[in-house]
Amino acid sequence: MARRLLQTVACAVALRPPHQGLRQPTRRPATLAQPTTTTVEVDLGDRSYPIYIGDGLLTEDAATASQYLQTHVKGSQVLIVTNEILDRLGYTQRTKAALEYGDSGLRVETLVLPDNEEQPSEATKTLENLGKITDYAIEKALDRKATFVALGGGVIGDMVGFAAACYVRGVDFIQIPTTLMAMVDSSVGGKTAVNSKSAKNMVGAFYQPVAVVADVGSLRTLPDRELASGVSEVIKYGLIRDAPFFEWLEDNIEKVLERDSEALIETVEASCRNKAEVVALDEKEGGVRATLNLGHTFGHAIETKAGYGTYLHGEAVGIGMHMAAKMSRDLGWISDELFERAVALVARAKVPIVLPLDSPLDVASFESIMAVDKKVADGLLRLILLKGDLGNCVFTGEYDRAVLKETLEHFCDPENRSN
């Protein structure tokens, strides 16, 4: 009976629009006039932590940024890990200045990892680079009271978080996400990992940060393609549990893509609040947290077969959400209208919704890669699918396998691909 209860998990939570919220946003006491900060709490008992969200938290000045960083460092040693792109943009120096501001007494080390066109970001999320982080920490004689700072997108956050979990059996770490994808998803919830050669995120741990600092000002230096990738991930929250947020996105998605400050803050706050509520219920993905992976089983197969770095994560998830929505519609679980609204909004995010003509993916490739997905239990592939009205979904292994096969065949058919 227990196993069967885990087969299907429903997620149906009615929320009000993000600007009304489930609860009023808490405001950090302002010792400086700017910027105003919205704080979302991730409630995990003695491991709870804040997500600070605002415009200019790190990009204004060291005095402002110091408020959100120094209070979460319990020792005297800090290691900032970032990539070459952010280092060239000056983020490393600004973060270091914030940690050293005033009489902090902190010794701040920095490690800059490669991230360029010759070595795509996701391809750097390896055990080799994980070893570079821990070896550097050993070289600098960092102790158990040290704090690691993950300054970057999801790849940096995943690696640094896992390094923090491993180093001397666990040190504190702070997430400073600089991409929309990282702000709304990977920096929140404690999933840390690196990729193996054959599968994504299969080597890792659940390990929570002590704080997340999300400055939407950093999104102004983000390439359009990466911003769109993050918006794709945002849409899932509306589809699986927050219908009013989905409707808000239908009205405001262009403002988000145009980097309107208020629209970005609303987007990050609503997404983080949704994820924080799910993580508080199911930290280690035993049930309801799996629903946050709408489209990801298909998307991970797309990323894996194409080679890490070919697709941005949100691009693969965009196609995956289209596949999940179509399968849900073909099972008779959602209406044609909801299917069309879902696909239309993903398309408006400016990410692909079908495979390109030159994609190497075929049905056999999908099936072999999905067979080792983390959501497989006792040989049964469980999927997150939409069911019922907008904002409702299920995590289930109880579906018609013929419809899954038909879905894969449809998307692999050259006639249903794009140029």
Image: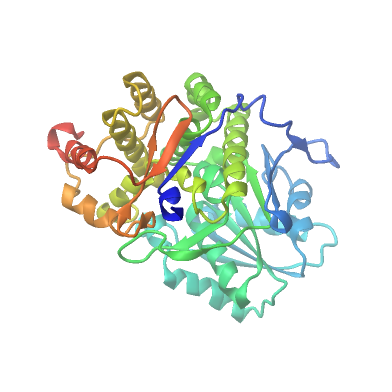
Relative to the observer, which residue lies in front, 26 or 2? 2
Q: Where is residue 296 in the image (x, y as percent from the top left)?
A: 38, 46
Q: Where is residue 122 in the image (x, y as percent from the top left)?
A: 40, 56
Determine the residue positioned at 67% across, 31% down: 22
Relative to the observer, which residue lies in front, 377 or 1? 1
**350 lies left or right of 187:** left
Determine the residue positioned at 46% across, 39% down: 233
**391 lies left or right of 65:** left
Q: From this view, report whether residue 60 is shown above or below residue 13.
A: below
Count of all numbered marks drawn on residues in the image: 0
Q: Quadrant of residue 343?
A: top left
Q: Which residue lies furthest to the front in this view?
A: 1
**6 lies left or right of 242:** left
Report the colour scheme: rainbow
Relative to the observer, which residue lies in front, 355 or 243? 243
Res 200 visible: yes
Check the picture and name the quadrant holding the C terminus.
Answer: top left
Q: Position of residue 55 (x, y in %)?
A: 66, 37
Determine the residue positioned at 50% across, 18% down: 251
Q: Where is residue 373 in the image (x, y as percent from the top left)?
A: 34, 56
Res 35 visible: no
Q: From this view, report whether residue 303 is shown above or below residue 27.
A: below
